[in-house]
Image: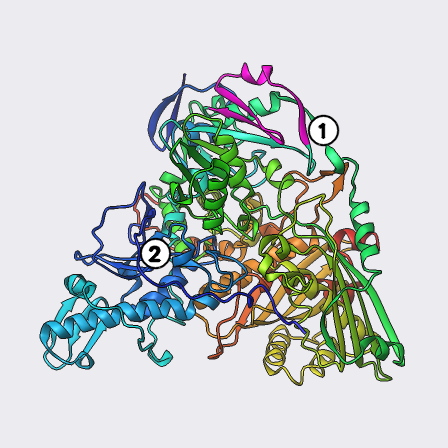
């Protein structure tokens, strides 16, 4: 039995050791990204995350990127807590690419994703801070010739308690730098925390209210050109012929770069580039996917689920138990391809020179960006410099480096730096989509309607086989199965199977919640079906199956209570519940209230979400992630869908990639359970728990069970 | 050549009349606070003010901006309302990735300048053209109300 996920796969040593620290300067106090690393003399750098100058300047180096989730506040909180400095005393820097120094311990490379930052850096960063603090205290004690135990550190100052003498960290930096780095340090008792668990103000937001925050798309370099692209509209297609005469005649267009699968218009500014792109006459050879439509994809997946898959979880003999059960229920669930549509369109700036390559972008995977640039240019890794920036949304899209590869390929043909910006249409049509998943699920129930056996077979691609082959073991894609193998309900016979089925007509990857977004929809909708068939209350039905999961039961009870479960609603309205537990280690319960109009329009009135994610670093950020994740989840559940015709994505911009707007956003209430459990992930779970709560609410309102997303379209045809 | 009045200053740029104001700001003048989101006035990331009225710079030909006072996110904090909105955004921790927030703040500042105490319906009408994928809408709503309740510190009035 493999209850693994990509969050529990690889263990690598936490980043340790010193090293030359380059990187762009991000000043947490002035809150401005500067143009280049400032030459602050770094005298005390006991590890790769902390640098203290003799001038007292405290710099924290951020290996986990900031894409809205608040890492540039939570990671500094972990360091500052143990370092004994205030958040108002620190300056932040983007880390350079370096897997040796900055690997995410779960993946073995420098990666911000899978809702892991707080979870996996909770202890390593505290240790990094405590190490520095221990050395500074030792330096002060040596200066005074006193016992270090008689000294205490606070707000960047070491005080000798008996005499009241003080030395600042800056004054101690030189001396501390000469001390050996201790291998064992004492971490603070959580009861002494000053920062962790408090609602700290974010360090990145002041620059985001006045337009000074620098995203990848904001890079400006001397002599820089701007390019926009048309990649083959069909995966696997090539440029058959190109007439660029009209494009070249447009004022400001400087160059047309033709590669085998993409054409770029290089210009003085984006307007000229866009006009040039529109003036190109490109004939495509669409290749093997030329005639593929969405129906072909669905047919392939449906056929795949007719065969048995790799068993990822097995307890008892589910097939036999279902066959012998007094009653059997079964259903097919499907979820569509989804686009990310992060607000910052995909972009990457590159300057290729004979002896080096520089890349400016926003990436969740800096070392992958560096490696692809090295591969495309043929330069050694150390000759590729990657400057990271704030990300205008990630949601998993910027875990891919396809856009870096493409930009470097184009930049190789261009003299000087070039910023490649995708139009929104290009962004939507060349995304790396949340896969289409197709699930068959069945249960055997006893005479009272209680489940005695559970059989869940899902078909979809194995994203990790491509992305992180070491994590794809025994034919199991831990991401695709995340949540499904974590089924909490107390059912004697359980079997979960994965049928790997690749449809290479669209590139698929991580989308906020990945496999859990579909598994939770399937599980929580189906358990609702069982409750309805048993004529039992959906919450009571779940509660009875959660005897072994007190934390799950607690959030369920909390959500039910806060939502006023059972209180009457007007006609046409309904309440639905869902529960989530997965490899993130967090427990969520959600109650949604919806109103369904006669024409099938679903209006979400209220969402109540109860969350137990263990130890919380910044409670306000957790709350913000839950609110935002729910909004993201509503967009996906009600409207989200990417379809194919003749191999081409049919959607293109926010006119047909409908996302929730403020006037459609419900009241959202978040209830946090505070405890001392290990920190769980929080970026993705709120998105994944939302779709089933909505589908169950739609069922409560209409009596219609919608087993395919998006909800609105399938409700109208139901 | 086109002469524009942006944030109280005069700028002359070599732009064709139909070039959208967005690219004039970003690529010719290096004012990067105004963001590109969709290019077709569907998302509001590029919102600027033209004589105080919120407009989508991505579809506004630069010729249409000539002779008008253009205000961008870089200078909205110099207006009493803009300053209140920025502060409310920080007080309520509205922002996540922040990419759409230039446009959100510009839209909110224009709303409050017109309607000092907006209702939920007013907020819906003024803000529904601005997309946020991080889902900061609940906090945007509250921050607008918070800003509306905040007295202006500037004597020039809101």
Q: Main SS of the magenta segment?
A: strand
Query: How far apart are the alpha carbons under marks 1 and 2?
Result: 47 Å
Q: Quadrant of residue A690?
A: bottom right
The residue carrying mark 1 is A285
Q: Using residue B122 as the reference point, say whether residue A353 is left or right of it.
A: left
**Picture coordinates of residue A466, whole percent (x, y):** 62, 52
Which residue appears at 84% of the width and 84% of the height?
Answer: A448
Determine contact: label 1, label 2, CB under 8 Å.
no
Chain letter for the residue marked with disc 2 in the picture = A
Quadrant where the N terminus of chain A sits is bottom right
Chain letter for the residue marked with disc 1 in the picture = A
SS of the residue under disc 1: strand
Which residue appears at 35% of the width and 42% of the height?
Answer: B79
Which segment did they paint magenta? A238-267
- Of callouts 1 and 2, which one flags the residue occurring earlier in the amino acid sequence? 2
The residue carrying mark 2 is A61
Q: Residues within 10 Å of mark 1 (few under 14, many from 20)?
A: some
| Residue A603 painted magenta | no
Res. A346 visible in picture: no
Res. A268 visible in picture: yes
Seen in the picture, residue B143 relative to B75 is either above or below; the reply is: below
Q: Using residue A619 as the reference point, say whether residue A671 is left or right of it.
A: right
Quadrant where the C terminus of chain A sits is bottom right
Q: Using residue A279 as the reference point, say whether residue B81 is left or right of it.
A: left
Number of on-image labels? 2
**Picture coordinates of residue A2, whole percent (x, y):** 65, 71
Q: Using residue B150 as the reference point, say whether residue A581 is left or right of it.
A: right
| Residue A265 painted magenta | yes
Same-subunit check for callouts 1 and 2: yes
Camera-nearest residue between A667 and A169: A169
């Amino acid at each position: 039995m493999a209850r693994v996920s990509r969050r529990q796969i690889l263990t690598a040593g936490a980043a340790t050791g010193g090293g030359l620290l380059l990187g762009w300067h991000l000043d947490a106090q002035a809150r401005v990204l500067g143009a280049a690393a400032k030459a602050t003399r770094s005298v005390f750098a006991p590890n790769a995350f902390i640098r203290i100058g003799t001038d007292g300047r405290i710099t924290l180096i951020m290996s986990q990127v900031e894409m809205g989730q608040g890492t540039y506040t939570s990671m500094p909180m972990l360091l500052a807590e143990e370092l004994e400095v205030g958040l108002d005393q620190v300056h932040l820097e983007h880390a350079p690419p370096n897997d040796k120094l900055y690997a995410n311990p779960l993946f073995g490379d420098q990666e911000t994703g899978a809702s892991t930052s707080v979870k996996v850096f909770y202890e390593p960063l505290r240790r990094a801070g405590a190490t520095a603090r221990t050395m500074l205290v030792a330096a002060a004690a040596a200066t005074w010739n006193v016992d270090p135990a008689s000294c205490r550190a606070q707000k960047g100052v070491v005080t000798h308690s008996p005499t009241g003498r003080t030395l600042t960290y800056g004054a101690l930096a030189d001396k501390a730098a000469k001390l050996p780095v201790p291998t064992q340090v004492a971490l603070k008792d959580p009861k002494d925390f000053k920062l962790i668990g408090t609602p700290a103000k974010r360090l990145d937001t002041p620059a985001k209210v006045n337009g000074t925050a620098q995203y990848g798309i904001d890079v400006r370099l001397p002599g820089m050109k701007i390019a926009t692209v048309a990649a083959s509209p069909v995966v696997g297609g090539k440029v058959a012929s190109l007439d660029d005469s009209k494009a070249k005649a447009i004022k400001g267009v400087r160059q047309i770069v033709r590669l085998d699968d993409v054409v770029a218009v290089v210009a003085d500014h984006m307007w000229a580039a866009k006009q040039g792109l529109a003036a190109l006459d490109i004939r495509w050879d669409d290749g093997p996917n030329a005639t593929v439509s969405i129906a072909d994809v669905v047919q392939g997946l449906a056929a795949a689920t007719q065969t048995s898959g790799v068993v990822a979880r097995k307890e008892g003999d589910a097939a036999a138990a279902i066959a012998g059960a007094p009653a059997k229920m079964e259903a097919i669930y499907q979820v569509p391809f989804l686009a990310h549509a992060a607000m910052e369109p995909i972009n990457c700036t590159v300057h290729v020179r004979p002896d080096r390559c520089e890349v400016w972008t926003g990436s969740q995977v800096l070392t992958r960006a560096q490696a692809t640039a090295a591969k495309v240019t043929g330069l050694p890794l150390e000759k590729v410099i990657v400057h990271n920036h704030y990300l205008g949304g990630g949601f998993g899209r910027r875990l891919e480096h396809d856009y870096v590869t493409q930009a470097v390929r184009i930049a190789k043909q261009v003299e000087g730096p070039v910023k490649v910006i995708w139009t929104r249409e290009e962004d939507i049509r060349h995304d790396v989509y949340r896969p289409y998943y197709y699930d068959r699920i069945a249960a055997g129930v006893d005479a009272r309607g209680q489940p005695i056996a559970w059989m869940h077979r899902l078909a979809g691609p194995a994203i990790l086989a491509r992305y992180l082959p070491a994590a794809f073991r025994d034919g199991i894609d831990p991401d695709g199965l995340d949540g499904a193998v974590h089924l909490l309900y107390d059912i004697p016979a359980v079997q979960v199977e994965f049928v790997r089925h690749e449809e290479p007509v669209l590139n698929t990857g991580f989308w906020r919640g990945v496999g859990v977004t579909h598994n939770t929809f399937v599980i929580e909708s189906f358990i609702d079906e069982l409750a309805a068939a048993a004529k039992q209350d959906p919450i009571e039905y779940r509660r009875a199956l959660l005897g072994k999961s007190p934390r799950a039961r607690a959030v369920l009870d909390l959500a039910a209570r806060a939502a006023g479960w059972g209180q009457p609603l007007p006609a046409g309205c309904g309440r639905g519940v869902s529960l989530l537990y997965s490899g993130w280690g967090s427990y969520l319960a959600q109650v949604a209230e919806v109103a369904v109009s006669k024409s099938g329009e679903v209006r979400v009135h209220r969402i109540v979400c109860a969350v137990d994610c263990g130890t919380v670093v910044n409670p306000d950020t957790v709350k913000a992630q839950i609110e935002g994740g729910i909004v993201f989840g509503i967009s996906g559940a009600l409207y989200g869908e990417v379809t194919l015709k003749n191999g081409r994505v049919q959607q293109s911009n926010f006119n047909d990639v409908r996302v929730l707007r403020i006037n459609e956003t419900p009241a959202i209430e978040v209830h946090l359970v505070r405890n001392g459990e290990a920190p769980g992930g929080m970026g993705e779970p709120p998105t994944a728990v939302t779709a089933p709560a909505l589908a169950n609410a739609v069922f409560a309102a209409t009596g219609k069970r919608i087993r395919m997303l998006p909800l609105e379209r399938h409700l109208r045809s139901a | 050549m086109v002469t524009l009045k942006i944030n109280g200053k005069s700028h002359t740029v070599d732009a064709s009349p139909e070039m959208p104001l967005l690219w004039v700001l970003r690529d010719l003048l290096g004012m990067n606070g105004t963001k590109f989101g969709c290019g077709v006035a569907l998302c509001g990331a590029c919102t600027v003010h033209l004589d105080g009225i919120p407009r989508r710079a991505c579809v506004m030909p630069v010729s249409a901006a000539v002779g008008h006072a253009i205000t961008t996110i870089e200078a909205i904090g110099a207006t009493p309302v803009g300053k209140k909105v920025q502060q409310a955004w920080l007080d309520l921790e509205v922002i996540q990735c922040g990419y759409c927030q230039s446009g959100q703040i510009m839209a909110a500042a224009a709303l409050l300048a017109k309607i000092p105490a907006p209702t939920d319906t007013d907020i819906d009408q003024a803000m529904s053209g601005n997309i946020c994928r991080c889902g900061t809408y609940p906090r945007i709503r509250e921050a607008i109300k918070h800003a509306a309740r905040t007295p202006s510190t500037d004597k020039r009035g809101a």
